[in-house]
Amino acid sequence: MRSVAAQGSLRVLPATGNAMGGEHLPEHLADTRHVTVVLRLVATAAGRLVHGELVDPDGASLAKFLDWEDLIEALQRHLDD
């Protein structure tokens, strides 16, 4: 399952097809890598994001964010490393 922000709240959608929204997938598995991150979120009872943190599997902080756009930027920076 994947989650998306909808008008400031969190809703869960089933994961279908390419999670990158139509981007071309590599033809060979050798052109890919597996990345594991932990997403820690603080949200209101209504599902509004208060703040969050992206951490590696060992618990080391990779980035902190206050909104969904900052989360996406933090993920992109991590993948670009």
Image (tube, rainbow, N blue to C red):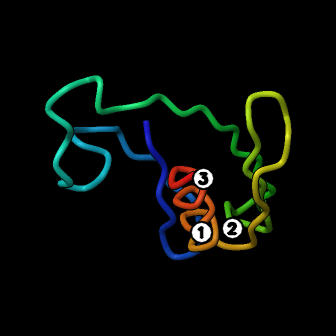
Taking depth in this image into account, of 9 and 51 the one nearest to the observer is: 51
Taking depth in this image into account, of 35 and 67 the one nearest to the observer is: 35
In this picture, is 36 found above or below 48? above
**In which quarter of the view is residue 77 placed?**
bottom right
Q: Amino acid at mark 1?
A: Trp
What number is the disc on residue 48?
2
Q: In the drawing, does residue 4 fall left or right of residue 48?
A: left
Q: Position of residue 76 (x, y in %)?
A: 52, 59
User: Farthest residue toward the top?
Assistant: 29
Mark-to-mark CA distance, 3 and 1:
15 Å
Q: Could you tell me which quadrant the N terminus lies in?
A: top left
For the point 70% across and 38% down, the residue is 38
Dot 2: element: loop
Task: Specify which label sits upstream in the sequence, 1 or 2.
Answer: 2
In this picture, is 32 found above or below 19? above
Mark-to-mark CA distance, 1 and 2:
10 Å
Dot 3: element: helix
Q: In the drawing, does residue 4 fall left or right of residue 47?
A: left
Q: Amino acid at mark 3?
A: His
Q: In the drawing, does residue 22 fall left or right of residue 9?
A: left
Q: Amino acid at mark 2?
A: Arg
What number is the disc on residue 9?
none
For the point 51% across and 55% down, the residue is 80
Task: Specify which label sits upstream in the sequence, 3 or 1.
Answer: 1
Residue at image mark 1 = 68
| Between marks 3 and 1 in the image, the one whose residue lies nearer the viewer | 3
Could you classify mark 2 by the number of other residues whose Cα lies within 10 Å: few (under 14), some (14-19), or many (20 or more)? some
For the point 82% across and 28% down, the residue is 58
Residue at image mark 3 = 78
Mark-to-mark CA distance, 3 and 2:
24 Å
Taking depth in this image into account, of 31 and 55 the one nearest to the observer is: 31
Q: Position of residue 73 (x, y in %)?
A: 57, 68
